[in-house]
Image (spheres, helix red, strand yellow):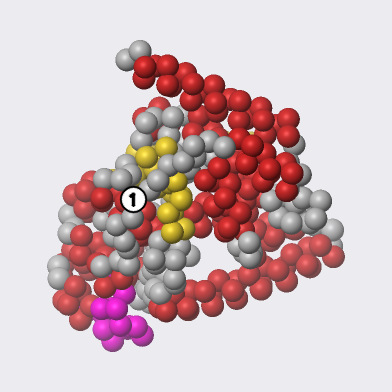
Amino acid sequence: MGLQIGELVSKKEISFEELKGKVIAVDAYNAIYQFLSSIRQPDGTPLMDSKRRITSHLSGLFYRNIALLSEGIKLVYVFDGEYNVLKRRTHEIRQEAKIIAADKYEKAKEEEDIEGMGKYARGFVRIEKGMVGESKALLEAMGVAVVSAPGEGEMQAAHLVKMGEAYAVASQDYDALVVGGRRLIQNLTLARRRKTPSGYAEVHPEMIEYEKVLNELNLTGDQLICLAILVGTDFNPGGIRGIGPKKALALVSQRKSPVEIFREVEHQMDFNWKDVFEIFKKPNVNNVKPVFGKLDTEEIVRILVEEHDFSEERVRKNLDKLMQVKKASAQRTLFG
């Protein structure tokens, strides 16, 4: 679900070289859902170990992050804390959608429709019990910092950027931008090649800058929050009926203050805009600083190979690659 403001904000394609040496705060749940959804067999079956435990998320966390760490990028994964009660309706909508997708998957399975199975299996992805703990353990063994947010992980990631503890937030959603995160990077944890009807296309990271968005749209930070609420957030799904991104932009540009903006549409609202505004204006975050550990190759092998049946040869080959990159980086630093 999330904020539907992508058509209003300008994005700049960036290279991995531009992120070398920088700390990126990753919205952990957002990334894990991506891995669980995309790393699957053609019929939609996720990767599993010999005990039928899903390992798609571990595969994504290991191999995608090895690639990023090898580029000299430092990573902080920020996990969600407690959900705000206003998010309940969003969870209900998502659960309803999962049930529908699961029914369509079963029908496709009965008809031996492999393509349909692959399509609908992605619609009822869920993070199951135990996945968060094992994800954190793997990340820490990789030397990736792990932060647990008191509330929304993406908002905590944005706070790390505002504190100067990170350069940018990596997420496919826009919440970090609306709460004032200075930089948002999309497509960072996605595969670098994406299958399209005409073949494979290269996927590049894209940067969205908070100040640039405000300047281009001629908005204040409060107006951007109002724009998000009008089109719909996870705390007021659906927004205001009949108001899309362009109409919302026109409204916030004309009325300026939050009170004036929502007075204009109060007859169309079935939620308290002030409650939602407060979530973005004063997000539930803390001042925790990320701690980066050391690469623990044997712990990684234990988690992936011994516990979940990954190929030891492939795992160690990737770890060797990462260690060589780290060694070369250390030598460059030593010799200036």
Q: Main secondary structure of the magenta part?
A: helix
Q: Is residue 198 visible?
A: no
Residue type at tag 1: Lys
Above or below, 313 against 5 in this view is: above
Residue 290 position, x and y percent, is: 38, 48
Question: Which residue ends up furthest to the top in the rendered image?
Answer: 335
Above or below, 100 against 108 in this view is: below
- How many marks are shown on the rendered structure? 1
Instruction: Tell me the magenta residue range.
Output: 264-277
Q: Residue 95 falls in which quadrant of the image? A: bottom right
Q: Is residue 266 magenta?
A: yes
Q: On the picture, is 165 further left or further right than 217?
A: right
Identified at 70% across, 68% down, the residue is 102
Front-lying residue, 145 or 103 = 145
Mark 1 Cα-neighbour bin, 10 Å: few <14, some 14–19, many ≥20: some
Residue 180 position, x and y percent, is: 26, 56
Q: Residue 122 falls in which quadrant of the image? A: bottom right
Q: Residue 130 falls in which quadrant of the image? A: bottom right
Identified at 58% across, 58% down, the residue is 133
Q: Is residue 161 visible?
A: yes
